[in-house]
Amino acid sequence: MKGFTLWFTGLSGAGKSTLAEKIEEELLDRGMKVELLDGDEVRTNLSKGLGFSKEDRDTNIRRIGYVANLLSRNGCVSITAAISPYASIRNEMREKCTNFVEVYCECSLDELERRDVKGLYKKARAGLIKNFTGIDDPYEAPENPEVTVDSEKQSEEESLDTILAYLESAGLIPAGADGKAYSAEQEKDSVSRLKEKGYI
Amino acid sequence: MKGFTLWFTGLSGAGKSTLAEKIEEELLDRGMKVELLDGDEVRTNLSKGLGFSKEDRDTNIRRIGYVANLLSRNGCVSITAAISPYASIRNEMREKCTNFVEVYCECSLDELERRDVKGLYKKARAGLIKNFTGIDDPYEAPENPEVTVDSEKQSEEESLDTILAYLESAGLIPAGADGKAYSAEQEKDSVSRLKEKGYI
């Protein structure tokens, strides 16, 4: 089984974590080895003490990339879902990580501020949160991402299909629901991971 | 292929890194997926900025354990070679990591100070290095390690054999040099990793 790094990038609220979890579930269900390195989880486990300056953000991203590559070069799919606002550091990770696939979660700032599910944009506008990407901290959109999804124009299901279609066409995952190509032992692993994650 | 975490612990100079590299080479040669998380490499990639207080050491070890477990639960062998002086945090990692194998590299302080290959013990005795494990910082030897090797009483080759014999008896690695059980593709991977590491 090929390992690869599926690197989500996009503004807060653009759908990175939700899509990352859906993909994780789908790939586990297809019998693949998968780890989701979510922004928050990584900050807890690897980057406690780092802030949101450019330098600290870069350090955080480099740590995620280091771990993502350890996994992907050993045949595991690593999914990352940090904002990762800077293009240069994303490109550094592209060079570093085995089979790097960048997924740009597009969504206009207007729409994100309208939704504001967690109320973070309001707080950032009011100056209660500093260094908030898109408000008082930059976001550099990818120029040539492997996949672009857009939560303003696509349903979650459509975005998911877009990503899966790319991964299938690139030969990184077995095709379709019938493409399960794994042993009984791997299936047991899959089922236990899906349960552990609360997906089933 | 089963993943496991081979956790070396011992004083500076007791042979952790050397043995870890030998084991890495041997397991790669047997067609296994292996990552060596050496103390120095991890401090560069994951723990820059951390010092050598108990709190910082514990944070460093927890990060290594987090990464080691991500790898081992996905069928990779992760080898760690940090001093990891505190028993409680090693036991925490034992609980956390899939198939945890503790290897205690024993060696008396007298002997280590006599060898003092890097001159670090002399500097620590002179107060030029602070918080040096074994001199002015504690080392808590493991009470029930899966494997103990002793560089005062054993040759490197004997220590290596002791570790491999344990791993074979525990069913964690295929037996002996004839036990290679991998595909042509895995062999290609192995050879390229061995070359990359400068082992061949």
Image (cartoon, coloured by chain):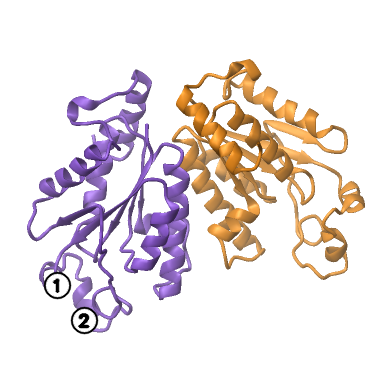
Chain colours: A orange, B purple
Q: Which of B198 and B91 lies nearest the eye of the viewer?
A: B91
Residue type pointed to by label 2: Arg
Which residue is painted at 57% across and 24% down in the image?
A: A172
* Of the pair A181 and A196, the residue shown nearer to us: A196
Is A178 or A103 nearer to us in this picture?
A178
Task: Pick whichever of labels 1 and 2 is earlier in the sequence.
Answer: 1
* Chain ID, mark 1: B
CA distance for labels 1 and 2: 10 Å
Would residue B108 appear left or right of A118 to someone viewing this image?
Answer: left
Image coords of residue B122 (percent x, y): 19, 77
A134 in relation to B183, above or below: below
Residue at 37% of width from left, 46% of height from top?
Answer: B99
- Tags 1 and 2 touching, CB below 8 Å: yes
Q: Indicate the amino acid at tag 1.
A: Glu
Toward the bottom, the furthest residue is B127
Residue A114 percent coordinates (x, y): 92, 51
Provide the residue designation for mark 1: B113
